[in-house]
Each structure stands twice: as structure tokens, then as C-alpha cells.
Image (cartoon, rainbow, N blue to C red):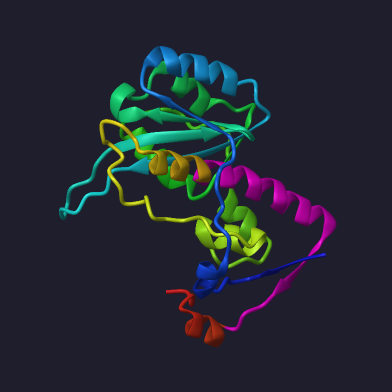
Amino acid sequence: MKQIYDKFDKTLFGQLPRALFPGRIEVIVSEREAERAVEFLMEQPLLGLDTETRPSFSSGRHNKVALLQVCCDDICFLFRLNHIGLPNCLIRLLEDKTIMKVGLSWHDDIRALSNRRRFLPGTYVELQEMAKLMGIRDMSLQKLYANVFGEVISKGQQLSNWEADNLSGAQQLYAATDAWACIRLYKELVQMKKEGYTLIHIPDSQAEEWGTAPS
């Protein structure tokens, strides 16, 4: 039976192997490419989604979401929204109610995407809600993934320029890994609920020593 913690010790990140998306990555920079990608994605049984936004270091300034990552098991499409906006094909995917789509803190992503173009969100699974119902207190993708799989997702590219003319290989891999991690987590959490799991409680006093106590 799998054992996990209700809160994960972030000081252990440096000891864990790195999680990396092992599949193919395609960067989408035109509406025609987006249409073809969406046609493929609409045939998949399960999708992981995430977004990236160029960080703003000026008070009161907020940039629009620049990238939408949509991933299945072996391929991830990176839609460069700063080039193509939200075309009708992507709206169709985002409003879809038939395909299982998984995200983490997805309500924030929906809000960011809606600032580009309004749409009626379809059906999504929120990993934070799944984890909370299972007694897990950590809500970040990095901690949740490390807790469940014993691997760390590097955040080294999080504050990079997502509106750059060309995304670097490191940016592409980072973005794809986040979306793919949502799929892996969903499948594993479902399996754990089915087979049973042991939840190890970490007292708040110990969590404070780890630097993971709730704020």
C-alpha cells in the first residue's frame, strides 16, 4: 500500500530525481497549426492543462497569459497565445464537456485565459480538490508531485520570458512537464483511492521546522 505525507518536506527536493516529460513537444504559432492540434486533442481520453505568463516586476502591471499547454500521455502542444490569441478551435476545446481535462489551480488559469477572450469553461478535474479530499494539505504541483512520486519538478524556468521570440528548449520542457504532471497525478490519485493508501500525518510543529506550515 502506498504511503504519502499530508505535508511534504520541501527541504528534500534537492535529494530527489528530476521529473521530465518524456514525450514529443510541438510549439504552435499559427491558427492553422492550432486547428490541427485541437482535432488531435479532441480524440484523446485524458488531457492535462496548464498556462504560463510572462512575469511582471512592476507594481500594478499584469501581463496576459502567453502560453497554454495541453498534454496527453506522449505529446504536448504549446499554444503561444501571445502570437495567436484564443482562436475558435481553442475555445471549442476549453468549453468542451466530454473530454476529461485535468489541471491544478485551474480556476486561476481560467481567469487568466478569459482576459484574452471570454468563454464558458467546460468540465475539468481540479487536482487540489482531489488531494484535499484525500487528506493532503500541500496544494502546489511541485510538492504534490514529489509527495506522490518521489521526484521533483524544477521551477527554474517559471519566471522566464514566456513572450520571447523563441521559447528555449528548457522553457518548452518545463511547460510540457507541468501539464504532463497533471495527468500522472490524476491517474495515480485515482489508483490510490481504489487500492487504498497510508497517509502519514506531519504535526504543524514539525512542518514549521520544514518550512511548510500553512500561512
Please say if 75 is above or below 109: above
Residue stretch in magenta: 178-203
Q: Is residue 208 magenta?
A: no
Q: Given the current orientation, which residue lies at the most extreme top position? A: 32
Q: Quadrant of residue 32?
A: top left
Residue 138 higher or lower than 162, as above or below: below
Question: Which one is in front, 57 or 139?
Answer: 57
Q: Looking at the picture, how far across and down is residue 159, in whole percent?
A: 31, 51
Q: Residue 114 falls in which quadrant of the image?
A: top left
133 w.r.t. 54: above or below? below
State the image coordinates of residue 155 (x, y, percent, origin top left).
42, 55
Residue 178 position within the rendered picture, expressed as x and y whole percent measured from the top left: 50, 46
**Residue shown at 54%/63% (left/top)?**
143
The x and y percentages for residue 23 are: 58, 35
Please state if 133 lies on the left or on the right of 181 as rendered: right
Name which residue lies at 52% across and 67% down. 13
Q: Residue at x 46, y 56 (%)?
A: 154
In the rendered image, the quadrant that contains the C terminus is bottom left
Name the image quarter holding the N terminus.
bottom right
- Between 93 and 209, the one lying in front of the other is 209
Image point (30%, 32%), residue name: 166
In the rendered image, residue 187 lying in the magenta stretch gets the answer yes
* Residue 193 vs residue 120, the one in the foreground: 193
Q: Main secondary structure of the magenta part?
A: helix
- Most extreme residue toward the bottom is 205
